[in-house]
Image (cartoon, coloured by chain):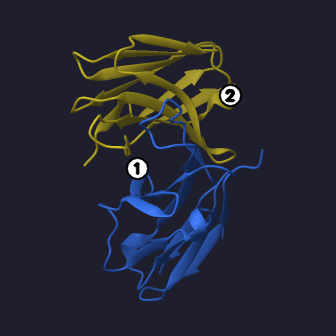
């Protein structure tokens, strides 16, 4: 069963705008990771946030984690056409080594 | 640094036939993963190796799927016999250590796109 579910399923924005994607999960986690997938570069790790962290930044990416609501958000600022891809959250629980991926948000950045 | 290599990139077979996928992880990566990604969904873990031992194969359909990792390096995933619902992209990934350590990033290969007719 899916642990993480992304929202929205699809998002279309203009280049230069910000994009926000949300992820909800069901059980307690050790960490949550965001990955990007496009046809050119496959699936690529973007950022990891641990359960005791609330916010993390990496370049134009900002991730937040609210363990009380079991949710995370990924913000991409000043989007570019090259950000067009599917974005997946993946969670790892304390009791398991495995990563469980959500179904993804498909982002289209229009030039 | 060379990435995770997979072959073939594409495969078309008829149902009930057999197929095998190959993966060469990043040099020095002890942990290797096989995922199945059905169109429109996120990757689902099939099996995880630590060196040449299996850590988790709870979601591997063992009646038709098998995987091995000889000498703790390359790995093969086999489907025998294939069903229509096996049509998917099969992704291989590797990481330095088991996720209990600090470094948990998984590095993915380009995948093998399988179509079962």
The picture places residue B35, in percent across and down from the top left corner, at 46, 57
B92 in relation to B1, above or below: below
Colour blue, chain: B
Q: Please give the residue where the numbered disc 2 appears in the rendered image.
A: A81
Q: Please give the residue where the numbered disc 1 appears in the rendered image.
A: B41
The picture places residue B5, in percent across and down from the top left corner, at 68, 59
Residue A70 showing in the rendered view: yes
**As drawn, is B28 to the left or to the right of A76?**
right
B87 in relation to B83, above or below: above
The picture places residue A103, in percent across and down from the top left corner, at 38, 43
The picture places residue A102, in percent across and down from the top left corner, at 37, 40
Measured Cα–Cα span from mark 1 to mark 2: 23 Å
Would you call the spot at circle 1 few (<14 residues within 10 Å), some (14-19), or many (20 or more)? some
Colour in which chain A is drawn? yellow
Q: In which quarter of the image is residue B23?
A: bottom right
Mark 1 on the same chain as mark 2: no
Q: In which quarter of the image is residue B46?
A: bottom left
């Amino acid at each position: 069963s899916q642990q993480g579910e992304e929202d929205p399923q699809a998002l279309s924005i203009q280049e230069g705008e910000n994009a926000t994607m949300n992820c909800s999960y069901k059980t307690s986690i050790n960490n949550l990771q965001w990955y990007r997938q496009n046809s050119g570069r496959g699936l690529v790790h973007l950022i990891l946030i641990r359960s005791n962290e609330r916010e993390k930044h990496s370049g134009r990416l900002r991730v937040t984690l609210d363990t009380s609501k079991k949710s995370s958000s990924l913000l991409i600022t000043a989007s570019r056409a090259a950000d067009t891809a599917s974005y997946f959250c993946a969670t790892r629980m304390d009791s398991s080594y495995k990563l469980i991926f959500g179904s993804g948000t498909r982002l289209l950045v229009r030039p | 640094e060379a990435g995770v290599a997979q072959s073939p990139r594409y495969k078309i077979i008829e149902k009930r036939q057999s197929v095998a996928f190959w993966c060469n992880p990043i040099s020095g990566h002890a942990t290797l993963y096989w995922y199945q990604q059905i169109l429109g969904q996120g990757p689902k873990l099939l099996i995880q190796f630590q060196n040449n031992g299996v850590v988790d194969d709870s979601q591997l359909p063992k009646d038709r799927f098998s995987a091995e990792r000889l000498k703790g390096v390359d790995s093969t995933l086999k489907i025998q016999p294939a069903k229509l619902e096996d049509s998917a992209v099969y992704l291989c990934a590797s990481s330095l250590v088991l996720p209990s350590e600090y470094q948990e990033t998984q590095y993915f290969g380009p995948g093998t796109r399988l179509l079962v007719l």
